[in-house]
Amino acid sequence: MRPVSVWQWSPWGLLLCLLCSSCLGSPSPSTGPEKKAGSQGLRFRLAGFPRKPYEGRVEIQRAGEWGTICDDDFTLQAAHVLCRELGFTEATGWTHSAKYGPGTGRIWLDNLSCSGTEQSVTECASRGWGNSDCTHDEDAGVICKDQRLPGFWDSNVIEARVRLKGGAHPGEGRVEVLKASTWGTVCDRKWDLHAASVVCRELGFGSAQAALSGARMGQGMGAIHLSEVRCSGQELSLWKCPHKNITAEDCSHSQDAGVRCNLPYTGAETRIRLSGGRSQHEGRVEVQIGGPGPLRWGLICGDDWGTLEAMVACRQLGLGYANHGLQETWYWDSGNITEVVMSGVRCTGTELSLDQCAHHGTHITCKRTGTRFTAGVICSETASDLLLHSALVQETAYIEDRPLHMLYCAAEENCLASSARSANWPYGHRRLLRFSSQIHNLGRADFRPKAGRHSWVWHECHGHYHSMDIFTHYDILTPNGTKVAEGHKASFCLEDTECQEDVSKRYECANFGEQGITVGCWDLYRHDIDCQWIDITDVKPGNYILQVVINPNFEVAESDFTNNAMKCNCKYDGHRIWVHNCHIGI
C-alpha cells in the first residue's frame, strides 16, 4: 500500500506487447508539482479495510518507514489535526482497537495529545517518535469530513492501477480506478474519446476506439470516484485530468463509463477456428501448428479441458466469453480433421491465445483417444460476474454451539468436520462459525447452473434440489495458508432474493422453479440456515483467515474470476471470534 506514481502495465498490455514484438514507446512517470502538508519530512496516508476514501487507519512515514499511531489518549482533537495533514477540512470521528485492521512496522506515536488547532502533528505532545508500549491491535483510525482543503494535492493519498472490467474482448470494459485502496467506477458525464484514450494508453493499449456510456459494460458496485472528467488526451493518467469528485446524488452505476481500445494486430485469431457447430459461436476447437513440414490444422485432446481453457479459446477467436468448455464433441461433425495436435492444455484464464497456456508440447498424451473426445466450446458475447458482499460477512459472523440431534440433515449433506462421524450422536454439540452470504451478479448475463433441471439431485432430508453440488467454499486458514477447517455450500436454492429498483426478479426456487441470479439482483443465504457455516469444533485458539470462494470449480463461466474470493482476518480465543478486515481479492 504505497503511493504509486510510476507507469503500470496491465497483464494484457504486456502480452500484446510481447505478441507484437515491440511496444510503441515507454511512458515516463509524472513529475507534476505537489502541495504537501505542514509536517516537513513526514508523509501521511489512510489504510485498512473495509473503509471509504476519507476514513481508515492512520499511517505516517518517517525516515522512509511507514508506521501507525496508538489509540492511547487519542481524541477527536488529534483526529482534526491528522485529517488536515491528509488534506481534509476536519474530522467527524475517530476509531480505536484497530477497527480498520492492524498495521505493520513501527508504532510511531503513543499518548498523542493535541488541542486541535496545531498546524502539524509534530506540534502535539506525545511520548516521542517510536516510543510506545502498544501493539498493532491498538492502532488508531480517523473518519474525516469528505471535503478537501482548497488547493491541497497530496501524493500521500494513494491514487493509481486503472483497470477494465466486464468487457468481452481484450482492451474493452467498464473503467474502474483505485482511490485510497478502494476500487470505484467513473461517471459517464462529459465522458469522451479524449478521456477514453488516456485510459487506453495508461493500460498499455493504443488510442481509444470508443468512449462508452450508460453502463454498456455492466454496472459496477460500491464507490463512484470520478465525474465530469475532462482530458486533453495527452495526460499520462486519468487522475491528471480535471475532474469532479463524486457525491451520492451526482451519479448512479447505470451511468458507469467504459472504453473500447485500439489493439495492435497480432494475427492470433488466424491460428484457431471452430468446426461442426450450429453457429459461428460453437464447435470443435481446431488449432494450426507448424513444423516439421508445412502448417497444418489439428484437434485438442479433451482431457481436463474446462471453463478456463474455453475462455482463452473464445477470446482468441474474438467471440467473447465461454458459456461451456466441452470434453466430448461426438455430436459435431469433425470433417476431415482427425489428428490431435495439442494435449494437456492448462490455462489461468487470462491468456490471449492457447499457445500461451501450459501444454504437453510435441509429446501428445491423451487418455481417451478418438475425435469424439476432443475439446469444444460454446462462446457468448456476455457473461455473469458474481461478487460477495464482504461487509455483510463481517457484520453477521458469530459462533453457535449446536446440539448434534439438530444436525442429522447437515451431516447427511457433508456440512460438518470429519471428526463429527465419531461423535456420540445424538449427544454433545458442534461449534459452528455462522455468517450470512449475499452474492451479487454484476455481469451482463444471468448466472445459471450448468446442469439442467433434469439432472438436479433431490435431497430428501432438507426437501430440496441441488442445482450445483458445490456453489461456495468456506475455509479457515492459518496466516501461512494451511487449512484447519472447511465447509461448502451447495446451491440448493439459487434465486433472486432482491434486485435493484429497475430490475425484476426472474428466478425463484419454490415449486421446482428455475434457479439462477439475474443481472442486477442478489441471492442471500442467511446465517441461520443449514450448512451456512464452518465447523470449527476442532480449531484451537489463535489468529486465522476466513476465506470464502464463490463458484470455486469454475463450473459456470464468468467475465471475471478474480473477484470470486473474499478473505477476512479472524481472532478466536476459544469462546468468541472477532472477524475484521474483510475484503475481496485472491
Image (spheres, helix red, strand yellow):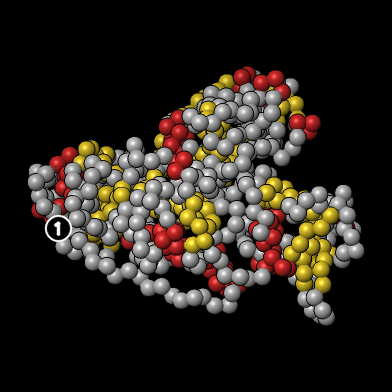
Q: Total label count?
A: 1
Label 1: few (<14), some (14–19) or many (≥20) C-alpha neighbours in 10 Å = some
Q: Is residue 274 above or below residue 454?
A: below
Name the image quarter holding the N terminus: bottom left
Q: Quadrant of residue 513?
A: top right
Q: Is residue 376 above or below residue 12?
A: above
Q: Residue at x 77, y 69 (%)?
A: 288
**Residue 431 drawn above or below residue 349:** above
Residue at position x 41%, y 52% in the image: 191
- Along the line of sight, the residue nearer the viewer: 77 or 450: 450
Can residue 111 be seen here? The reply is no
Residue 105's image quarter? bottom left
Image position, residue 234 (x, y; %):
37, 67
Image spot of residue 266 (x, y percent) = 63, 71
Q: Residue at x 41, y 59 (%)?
A: 195
Please state which amino acid type lies under the numbered disc 1: Gly
Q: Is residue 153 visible?
A: yes
Would you say 523 lies left or right of 95 here?
Answer: right
Q: Is residue 347 above or below residue 509?
A: below
Which residue is at the front of the view, 179 or 65? 179
* SS category of the residue bearing label 1: loop
Q: Of 553 and 445, which appears nearest the observer?
A: 445
User: Would residue 60 be found to the left or right of residue 301 on screen?
Assistant: left
Name the residue that disc number 1 marks: 38
The single residue placed furthest to the bottom in the displayed view is 293
Tell me where residue 251 appears, x and y as whole percent.
Answer: 38, 41
Q: Which residue is painted at 73% across and 52% down in the image?
A: 281
